[in-house]
Image: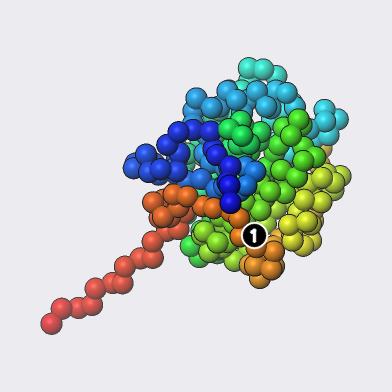
């Protein structure tokens, strides 16, 4: 079985002992997901500039794609830096870049709070317009769910999309998510219905793929799952 490369020599090979998240890679036969290096921010920003959704459509609660240049680029870089600076086992957000044939095509996020207790994750993503309609969105989601369930032992995963974001909702259904209520969410200058979806571990197991590989997780597992507190010492004597 041939799995996709991630585009950087040494990724997934234990080269970052102080920030082992840089060595974490999730690979499928078509793509790889890992944290982008700072020097790769430019490639991500170029994909955003080329378009990740139709101008009339806004799929995000924060309309960052509407921001003019260079504010869009600066604020995007700040967002990626912030997720790293504020990372803790109690609250984390892995902002994974998606690579196909060594080239950046999008982003697949996975985040959680109090994961050690709740075993619940949330996911979000975007994909360059030039790469949509090829099944990559589904494969990105399957890859990150494999990290969540097979790698980290999650019990459920949540996502959501605006009511008129048919491609995202179709991807969720195809992966096995089920409806999980709705809510109003901010959208550009107003609000719109956000349709929430959920997949549990049993449903994921029924659809589990056997061609996804996780590299480098053991070295950074403690960054995702807070260690259980040590038992209090009893009285002496």
On screen, 14 above or below 44?
below
Image-quadrant location for residue 50:
top right
Query: What residue is shown at x 64% (from left), y 59% (from top)?
Result: 209
- Considering depth in this image, is 70 or 24 the residue closer to the camera? 24
Left or right relative to 124: residue 171: right
Q: What scheme was used to colour the molecule?
A: rainbow
Tell me the residue that label 1 is attached to. 209
Question: Residue 140: percent from the left, percent from the top?
Answer: 66, 46
Question: Residue 41: percent from the left, percent from the top?
Answer: 55, 27
- Considering depth in this image, is 28 or 49 the residue closer to the camera? 28
On screen, 149 above or below 127?
below
Query: What residue is shown at x 51% (from left), y 45% (from top)?
Result: 25
> Looking at the image, can residue 145 be seen?
yes
Image-quadrant location for residue 197:
bottom right
Left or right relative to 215: residue 128: right
* Residue extending furthest toward the bottom: 237
Left or right relative to 234: residue 89: right
Query: What residue is shown at x 66% (from left), y 33% (from top)?
Result: 105
* Residue extending furthest toward the front: 1
- Considering depth in this image, is 235 or 84 the residue closer to the camera? 84
Q: How many marks?
A: 1
């Amino acid at each position: 079985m041939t799995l996709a490369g991630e585009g950087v020599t040494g990724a997934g090979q234990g080269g970052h002992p102080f920030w082992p998240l840089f060595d974490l890679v999730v690979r499928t036969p078509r793509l790889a997901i890992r944290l982008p290096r700072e020097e790769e921010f430019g490639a991500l920003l170029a994909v955003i500039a080329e378009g990740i959704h139709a101008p009339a459509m806004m799929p995000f609660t924060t309309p960052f794609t509407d921001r003019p240049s260079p504010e869009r680029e600066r604020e995007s870089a700040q967002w990626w830096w912030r997720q790293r600076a504020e990372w803790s086992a109690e609250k984390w957000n892995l902002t994974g870049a998606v690579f196909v044939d060594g080239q950046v095509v999008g982003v697949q996020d996975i985040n959680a709070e109090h994961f050690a207790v709740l075993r619940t994750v949330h996911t979000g993503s975007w994909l360059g317009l030039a790469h949509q309609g090829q099944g990559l969105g589904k494969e990105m989601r399957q890859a990150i769910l494999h990290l969540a369930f097979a790698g980290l032992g999650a019990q459920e995963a949540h996502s959501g999309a605006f009511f008129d974001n048919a491609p995202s909702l179709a991807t969720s259904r195809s992966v096995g998510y089920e409806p999980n209520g709705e809510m109003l969410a901010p959208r550009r200058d107003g609000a719109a219905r956000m349709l929430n979806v959920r997949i549990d571990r049993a449903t994921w197991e029924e659809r589990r793929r056997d061609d996804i590989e996780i590299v480098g997780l053991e070295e950074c597992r403690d960054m995702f799952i807070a260690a259980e507190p040590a038992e209090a010492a009893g009285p002496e004597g």
